[in-house]
Image (cartoon, rainbow, N blue to C red):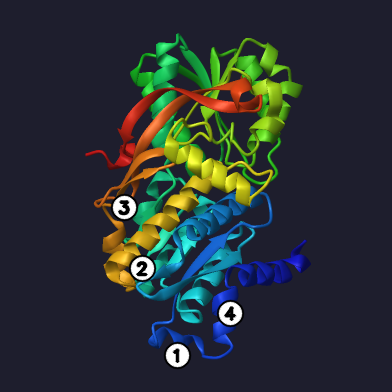
Amino acid sequence: MNSTLPSKRKLMTCALGVVAAAAATLVSGTALAQAGGTIKIGLILPMTGASASTGREVSAAVNLYLAQNGSTVAGKKVEVILKDDAGVADTTRRLAQELVVNDKVTVLAGFGLTPLAVAVAPIATQSKTPQVVMAAATSSIVDASPYIVRTSFTLPQVTLGMAEWAAKNKIKKVVTLVTDYGPGIDAERTFKERTLLNGGQVLAELRVPLRNPDFAPFLQRVADAKPDAVFVFVPSGFGAGFMKQFAERGLDKSGIKLIATGDVTDDEQLNDIGDVAMGMITSHHYSVAHPSATNKKFVEAFTKANPGLRPNFMAVGGYDGMRVIMKGLEATKGAGGEALLNAMKGQVFESPRGPVLIDAQSRDIVQDVYIRKVERVPAMGNQLYNVEFDVQKAVKDPAKVK
Ligand code: VNL
């Protein structure tokens, strides 16, 4: 698989940067920058490997934003240079270094997983390059560099609502089952703390490895503990694998309720997961079925540009991330560094997910969190959707609430 990486990477970079690449054959990159020709954005994503769906969703949404809004700012062409890190942190770091030193990018963006975002933080700080985290969601990421701005979400932010719903719906005894790294541990801690506060009980806290997860032994422990519910977090792209084993183990017929963050019932995978997900309650910041005019427009344009692909919450993180970058660049007339960072802070806008704010203090996103139920929707092609039925307004990451 590795041998196909360089050519694929080259291909994707080309596809995105045709105009700038053609120009670069005439004038060197530095000369162009001096002439005010292009502004470069380094977009680093896992386009291959276990998290390739995240790369696919984010990059498609970045392209859509530029196609809809134009890629010129203050008379300068914005060029996105897409790089594939295959989900490997050492690669992310090396690519970021090259993008800053050789390509002289104004912004680093993307970051499909927490370790990949954290690996780049020192480079952002040292080079004073704004780093826009469009996907990764461990609460502490924004503390890794003052140059980080986040347009995705945090696990504590979306988990609180699930814990509250559980307490209100007679779920007293729970087991938590999470992927064993930053976002999973955030979800586990948040769910536990809120459950205990509400008088509930956590019977077991199970952590499954990120690489090649086998859920079977953990699901056996869930079955043995006989909780009212199991609360689950797995990263985007892993939901279908988890749900398959959940059904194979007969857990769907055990009377143990399955509740989760929306990462598990990921809109991209939900139809493949199928009926085993029916009725499942989750909490999250985005559903492709969000009933707003802004979202309908977004979903229509996204599916038209990417036939057969549904936008998920990763796509929205990429779309809004590009919005934050372009509006920032408009405000600075194309300047980067601290000026751009400041222009990204405090942006308020209507996202396909609902109203959002980039909190100027924390540089993290404040947004509505929805409680949703998986349903088959006859009016929408009889497909499966996460249908929102309750909302918590303007939720800040709990770690940033003073
Ligand atoms: C992360 C968090 C990644 C939530 C995810 O999918 C996710 C992360 C790739 O911070 O690594 O759904």
The answer to whether marks 3 and 1 mark residues whose Cβ atoms lie closer than 8 Å is no
How far from the left and from the top, in percent, is residue 291? 46, 30
Sequence-first tag of 2 and 3: 2
Residue linked to disc 4: 21
Sequence-first tag of 3 and 4: 4
- Find numbered disc 3 in the image and state the secondary structure of the residue it sits on: loop
Sequence-first tag of 4 and 2: 4
Q: Mark 3, residues whose alpha carbon is within 10 Å: few (<14), some, or many (≥20)?
A: many
Residue located at (31% from left, 40% from top)? 399
How far from the left and from the top, in percent, is residue 250? 73, 17
- Cα separation, mark 4 vs mark 2, equals 28 Å
Residue type at mark 1 is Ala
Residue linked to disc 2: 125
Q: Which mark is residue 31?
A: 1
User: Within the image, what quadrant is residue 216 found in?
Assistant: top right
Residue 134, placed above or below residue 271: below
Q: Mark 1, residues whose alpha carbon is within 10 Å: few (<14), some, or many (≥20)?
A: few
Q: Nearer the viewer, mark 2 or mark 3?
A: 3
- Cα separation, mark 3 vs mark 1, equals 33 Å
Residue 313 appears in the rendering: no
How far from the left and from the top, in percent, is residue 8? 71, 67
Task: Give the residue furthest to the left.
Answer: 402
Residue type at mark 3 is Arg
- Cα separation, mark 3 vs mark 4, equals 33 Å
Left or right: where 112 falls relative to 248:
left
User: Within the image, what quadrant is residue 34 found in?
Assistant: bottom left
Residue linked to disc 3: 363
